[in-house]
Image (spheres, rainbow, N blue to C red):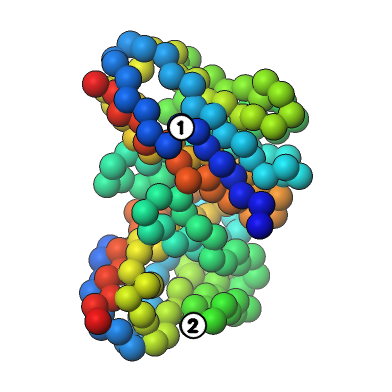
Amino acid sequence: EPEVTQTPSHQVTQMGQEVILRCVPISNHLYFYWYRQILGQKVEFLVSFYNNEISEKSEIFDDQFSVERPDGSNFTLKIRSTKLEDSAMYFCASNAETQYFGPGTRLLVL
Amino acid sequence: EDKVVQSPLSLVVHEGDTVTLNCSYEVTNFRSLLWYKQEKKAPTFLFMLTSSGIEKKSGRLSSILDKKELSSILNITATQTGDSAIYLCAVAGGGSQGNLIFGKGTKLSVKP
C-alpha cells in the first residue's frame, strides 16, 4: 500500500541552525501539507502546497519557514533559524480525497 | 475562530467494553470530518464523513456525522487492548485546500 515517507525520523539541532525536513508524498497525490505537533498538544496546520506553490499557510508559518518541491517526488520543509519553540513532531501529509500522514520527524532544538 | 472539541479527553475501559468518543466543531466552510488513530507517531486514517446520518463502519469501529448538531461520534465495540491509542477528530474546512483543524484527541486506554 502506498504511504507517505519522511526523513529523518529524529533530528537534534542547535538553536539558530537551519534544518530541512524531507517528505515523499504518495505518488499520484497533488496536495501536500505540513503539520506540527508540540509534545502534549494538538496537531496544528502549517502549510498546504499545490501546483508547485503555497496555497495556504497558518500564522505559525512565518518567514523562518519555507517549503519546496525540488523534484518530482520530494517535498521539503526548511526552518531557517531554529528556535527552542520549534521543537515538535513535524508531519507531512498528502491528499487525494483523504489526507494520509507520514510517520513524522521529531525535531529537538537545543 | 475555527475549532474542534473532543470529549472526553481520556478514557479508561476494560476489554470488551463499548466506548463512544465525541467530537464537536465550529468550522467555516465545512467540507468533511475525519477520524484518525494515533498510536506512537503518525495519525492513521479511520473514517471520512461528509454526509449527515450515514454511518461508516469498519469492523468494530463505526462513526456518524450530525451536521445539524455539528458533531460526530466514534463508536468502538468489544474493545481490545490494541485499541489503546489517541483518537483524533479533524475537520476540513476554511481554507481552499481542505487544511485540517484537529481536536486535542481522546486518549483511550483499554485494560485487559
Query: Does any portion of residue B53 appear in the rendered image?
Result: no
Give the x, y percent position of residue A49. Answer: 64, 32
Q: Amino acid at mark 2?
A: Arg
Provide the residue designation for mark 2: B60
Residue count near mark 1 (Cα–Cα under 10 Å), binned few <14, some 14–19, many ≥20: some
Q: Is residue A41 left or right of residue B96?
A: left
Say if A2 sits above or below A79 in the image.
below
Residue count near mark 2 (Cα–Cα under 10 Å), binned few <14, some 14–19, many ≥20: few
Q: Dot 1 falls on which chain?
A: A
SS at badge 1: loop
Determine whether label 1 and label 2 are within 8 Å by CB.
Answer: no
Q: CA distance from mark 1 to mark 2?
A: 35 Å
Q: Dot 2 falls on which chain?
A: B
Say if A17 sits above or below B29 in the image.
above
Give the x, y percent position of residue A31. Answer: 68, 40
Camera-side residue of A47 and B60: B60
Give the x, y percent position of residue B46. Answer: 54, 66
Residue B68: image quadrant is bottom right
* Quarter of the image with the N terminus of chain A in it: bottom right
Q: Is residue A49 left or right of residue A90?
A: right
Residue A15: image quadrant is top left
Give the x, y percent position of residue B50. Answer: 64, 65
Provide the residue designation for mark 1: A8
Say if B95 sits above or below B73 in the image.
above
